[in-house]
C-alpha cells in the first residue's frame, strides 16, 4: 500500500453514551494505488476502516466508533486515552 503524505484530521463528535459526549479524532490517509481513503481513530482500539470518498469514510468511522463503544463498559470508555496530535 502506498500512502500519500497528505493527511486530514477531523473530529467526530456524535458518539453519545449515557449523557457523555465523546470526541474522537480520526487520522486519514489516501492510498495512491487504490485511491481509497483509510481512516484510523488512534485512541480507540480496533477503530479503522476505508472508503472511496471522505463522506463515506466519515460515515463508516462513526459506525466503527459506535460499534467499538458498544463492546466497552463505562470504566473502559472513561479510561480511553485522549489523542493530542501527531
Image (cartoon, grey):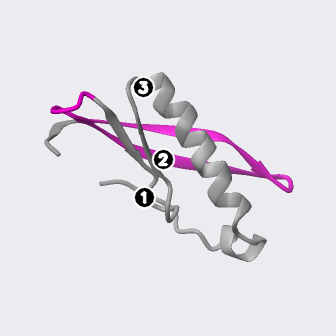
Q: Judge by depth and name the residue closer to the eye, 30 or 75.
A: 30
- In this rendered view, identify the residue nearer to me: 41 or 68: 68
Residue numbers of the magenta segment: 7-35
Q: Nearer the viewer, mark 2 or mark 3?
A: 3
User: CB atoms at circles 1 and 2 under 8 Å apart?
Assistant: yes
The answer to whether marks 3 and 1 mark residues whose Cβ atoms lie closer than 8 Å is no
Q: CA distance from mark 2 to mark 3?
A: 14 Å
Looking at the rendering, which quadrant does residue 50 occupy? Answer: top left
The quarter in which the C terminus is drawn is bottom left
Q: Which quarter of the figure has residue 13?
A: top right
Give residue 51's mark.
Answer: none
**Residue of label 3:** 54
Residue 3: x %, y % from top left? 17, 41
Left or right: residue 73 versus residue 47 is right
Looking at the image, is mark 3 or mark 1 earlier in the sequence?
Answer: 1
Asked if the residue at tag 3 contacts the one at tag 2, i.e. Cβ–Cβ closer than 8 Å, the answer is: no
**Mark closer to the chain start, 2 or 3:** 2
8 vs 22: above or below: above
Amino acid at each position: 500500500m502506498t500512502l500519500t503524505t497528505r493527511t486530514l484530521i477531523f473530529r467526530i463528535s456524535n458518539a453519545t453514551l449515557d449523557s457523555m459526549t465523546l470526541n474522537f479524532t480520526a487520522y486519514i490517509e489516501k492510498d495512491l494505488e487504490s485511491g481509497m481513503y483509510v481512516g484510523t481513530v488512534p485512541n480507540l482500539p480496533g477503530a479503522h476502516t476505508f472508503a472511496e470518498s471522505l463522506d463515506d469514510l466519515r460515515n463508516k468511522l462513526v459506525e466503527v466508533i459506535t460499534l467499538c463503544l458498544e463492546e466497552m463498559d463505562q470504566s473502559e470508555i472513561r479510561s480511553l486515552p485522549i489523542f493530542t496530535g501527531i
